[in-house]
Each structure stands twice: as C-alpha cells, then as structure tokens.
Amino acid sequence: MDNEENKTELSHWYVVYTYSGYENKVKATLEKIVENRGIQDKIQEVIIPMEEEIEIKDGKQKTSIKKVFPGYVLVKMIMSDETWYVVKNIKGVFNFVGVGDKPLPLTEKEMQTLGIEDIINLDFEVGDSVRITTEPFYNYPAVIEEIFKDRKRVKVKVSMFGRETTVDLEFNQIQKI
C-alpha cells in the first residue's frame, strides 16, 4: 500500500493468533520492532487480554492473573503491506484472525465486549476556543472548561446575551477554531 493512503486510514484492533505460550514473547518482540523502526504511528498498541481469577482452596483465597484468550494477542494498527509483514513474520505468530489471508478488524461491539477502549487523541485541550456545530447552540463560540475522555464529552462555556452558560457536549459537537 502507498504511504499516502496510510495517512488517511484509521487504525483498528486486529486479533493475532500465536503459538501456545508465545503471547508474551510476541508482544515484547513486536513492541521492540515498532520502537526500533519508529513506526508507532502505524502500530500503536499491543495487548494480551488478562483477567483476575480468585480461587479459594483450603479456606484461603488466592488471586492470579490469567489470559482471557490464550494463544491470542490484540494489535491496534493501520493495516498495510508493511505492518502485516512486520506482525506476520514475528517468531511465534501463526496468523491474523480473518477470512483467508484477509485480516478482519474487531468491530466496535467486539471491542466493548473485550473491554477495550480506544485511546482518543484530541486536537483540543482545556482553554481552547471552539465552535459548537449542533443545535441549539449552532455556530456559537465557546471555551473548553473540562474534558471527559471516558465519556467522550466536554464541558464548554458559552457566552449568550451577555451571560456565560456552561454546556455539556459530545466531542463531535465541537470544532476547534
């Protein structure tokens, strides 16, 4: 794929099938390759889904961390020939999960089921001037007071009729000025 195409493409989460017991090695190797090649913009995150398991044995509680999906690693990346090749050629990687040779990204619903939150990179911060893009405050200028990444919302201060009003909006309801 052309590098110009990659700039406009979005990254997605992909599931990588590894040989049994190779999950940690694959994760460590991939993170090292990404750092060495400086391709953090193309392969952003690698995780092994884990969960806490509580076991009671002989009246004693024992807590351990277990892999949710042994043999699988999740990778957030922009799929291209280069990134596919990098991941596919790591020792211990069997294949991407998908149809034939075509890796399929996780859907939004699958990501929520797995408890994966997309890291949101915002182009605005507290104190920035923005314009509201939806009714009833369409085209009003505002200033960001608070950002709630977990809820994908912002609190902005709008000046109307000589008074300042605080409004709670979604990220997609504002545009940086």
Image (cartoon, helix red, strand yellow):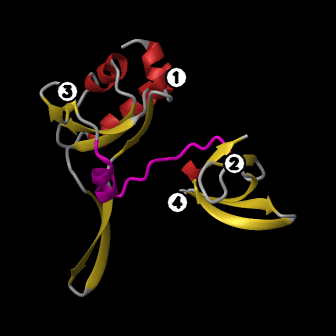
Instruction: Say left or right for 84 vs 7.
Output: left
Q: Which of the 4 image quadrants contains residue 98? A: top left
Q: Quadrant location of residue 93?
A: top left
Q: Which of marks 3 and 4 is nearer the N terminus?
A: 3
Asked which quadrant contains residue 57, the reply is bottom left
Left or right position of 74 against 177: left
Measure how far apart labels 1 and 3 are at the Cα level. 25 Å
What is the total number of numbered labels drawn onto the structure image? Answer: 4
Mark number for residue 139? 2
> What label sits on residue 65 in the rendered view?
none
Residue at position x 29%, y 46% in the image: 107
Question: Percent from the top left, x then y, of residue 126?
Answer: 73, 53
Q: What residue type is labelled 4?
A: Asp
Q: Which residue in the structure is indicated by mark 1?
A: 38
| Residue underneath mark 4 | 150
Q: What residue type is labelled 1?
A: Gly
Q: Is residue 21 above or below residue 137?
A: above
> Distance from label 3 to label 2 (Cα)?
43 Å
Residue at the left extreme, as displayed:
100
Residue 17: % across, % down: 20, 37
Q: In which quarter of the image is the N terminus?
A: top left
Circle 3 residue: 102
At label 2, the amino acid type is Asn
Q: Residue placed at 37% from the left, 37% from the top?
A: 12
